[in-house]
Amino acid sequence: MKASGLDSQLNAKWARVRGRLRSEYGEQAYRSWLKPLTLVGHDNGAFKIAVPTRFIRDWVMQHYSDRLRQLLAGEVNEFRAVEIVVDSAKAPADAEASQPAYLQAAPAAVAELPSPGPGADDVSAPLDPRFTFENFVVGKSNELAYAAARRVAESKTVPFNPLFLYGGVGLGKTHLMHAIAWHIKKAQPERRVIYLSAEKFMYQFIRALRHKNTMAFKEQFRSVDVLMIDDVQFISGKDSTQEEFFHTFNALVDQNRQVVISADKSPSDLEGLEERMRSRLGWGLVADIHPTTYELRLGILQNKGEQLGAEIPPKVLEFLAHKILSNVRELEGALNRIVAHATLVGRPVTLETTQEVLHDLLRANDRRVTIEEIQRKVAEHFNIKISEMQSARRARAVARPRQVAMYLAKQLTSRSLPEIGRKFGGRDHTTVMHAVRKVEELRSTDSSFSEDVDLLRRMLEA
């Protein structure tokens, strides 16, 4: 692979990708995690990107890899794959020496983002090595989902089909799905497992249609032993993708192959799905994951602290467990931030430094405004049905309130643009960006409209 001498056209494309990442994820996330990405090579659609530490590589792989792949594929027609390597030369002088083991770079460590291909290993998304059953903290809010996931992973027959896991963002659905896949790969390596998001399933299907290769697509997905689809709500309103998924699902169930699905709502509450699809998804075992309790959050933090090999004062862990109520992902992210700050700055972790480092996150959790609450308030204010927030209707009487709700969701929550889009009927993040720009434009020219938006914001922040 060519590691140097990248042409100006390729550099311009890479600059556009970085610009999109910056605008979508915000200045703070960009500076912390995305700015260190350096394009160091490109050869026939395969990109090589370097980061300074293993810690940054793992974080990028967990939180930004899918979007990075999508943006590169949009810039380069012949896109095949992305390889992320750790290059300690990209780190500041002496940075590695001062870091503990969990932050130190392994020079030979490589993580690859898969490109579409004919085999299950090619189409399946990468599994996070941290997401195992051993690392999953069990409490009352998730014990049914955990027990069901273990039963599926350990059984040589199909105990229930499908296993449908649902719950809010960051509560552990993806962790359990990865854990099932890891366990099967270790205990029964002969079984073929495909794990991917519903978004990538749709991407593969559209790609097969474009290349007139639907038979290969059907064979690929209907010949596996275990099919795992994450965030199935993404295909709401996507009729052709739903149709193909429906037939794939039926074919696998008829062959007694295991299917595992996750979503943010139960099958009966998923809007935009055909009735027959909702019925099929509810056939097996439906297990929900409730919001975490204080005891569970504290246990998760203690477990995460042990994984990081960091000494965190019990008072800090108790403080975080009390203050961050939203989801496990945000809870673990907060702990990562304070440990990274202590390591890089050289100051011990205390209650005071924790409050200082996490001031933005703590302020957001004190406010605790949810997208669902925003949708409800906006729908009441503009006298429309709340279901129309997720509908496909484009009439101005519906579209304008929907745009206002998207704008407020961006302003008042810490959710990413793709997450906000999914809450509004599975819309693309670009739709959310357009809504935000449109509302800002209208506010600058229409004082009455601006007062309406300000009123809604004050009501939600009260």
Image (cartoon, helix red, strand yellow):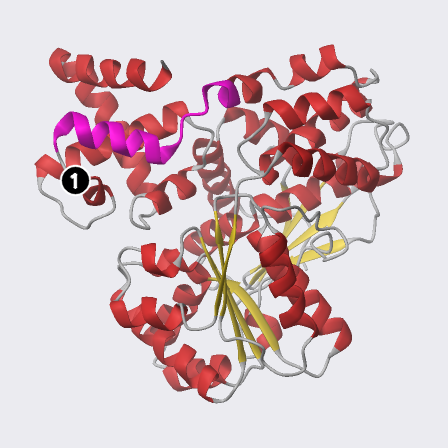
Q: Quadrant of residue 174?
A: bottom right
Which residue carries the number 1 mark? 385
Main structural element of the magenta stretch: helix, strand or loop?
helix
Residue 165 versus residue 218 in the image, above or below:
above
Q: Looking at this view, is 249 or 433 the one in front?
A: 249
Say whether residue 11 is visible: yes
Total numbered labels placed on residues in the image: 1
Residue 452, image x, y percentages: 18, 17
Could you say which is closer to the camera, residue 135 or residue 37? Answer: 135
Quadrant of the snapshot with the C terminus: top left
Q: Residue at x 74, y 26 (%)?
A: 317
x, y percent for residue 236: 31, 58
Q: Position of residue 400 (x, y in %)?
A: 16, 33
Is residue 204 covered in magenta? no
- Disc 1 element: loop
Query: Residue furthest toward the bottom?
Result: 255
Q: Residue at x 43, y 69 (%)?
A: 204
Residue range highlighted in magenta: 364-383
Looking at the picture, tell me which residue is in the foreground, 217 or 339: 339
Determine the image quadrant of residue 47: bottom right
Q: Quadrant of the N terminus?
A: bottom right
Query: Does 338 sit above or below residue 347?
Result: below
Q: Nearer the viewer, residue 82 or 225?
A: 225
Q: Is residue 429 left or right of residue 48?
A: left
Query: Residue 111, how many percent across, how many down?
Result: 70, 55
Q: Is residue 379 magenta?
A: yes
Q: Residue at x 64, y 60 (%)?
A: 178
Left or right of residue 259, residue 390 in this image:
left
- Which residue type does callout 1 highlight? Lys
Q: Would residue 122 appear left or right of 417 to someone viewing this image?
A: right
Residue ranking furthest to the front? 140
> Looking at the image, is 446 positioned above or below residue 220?
above
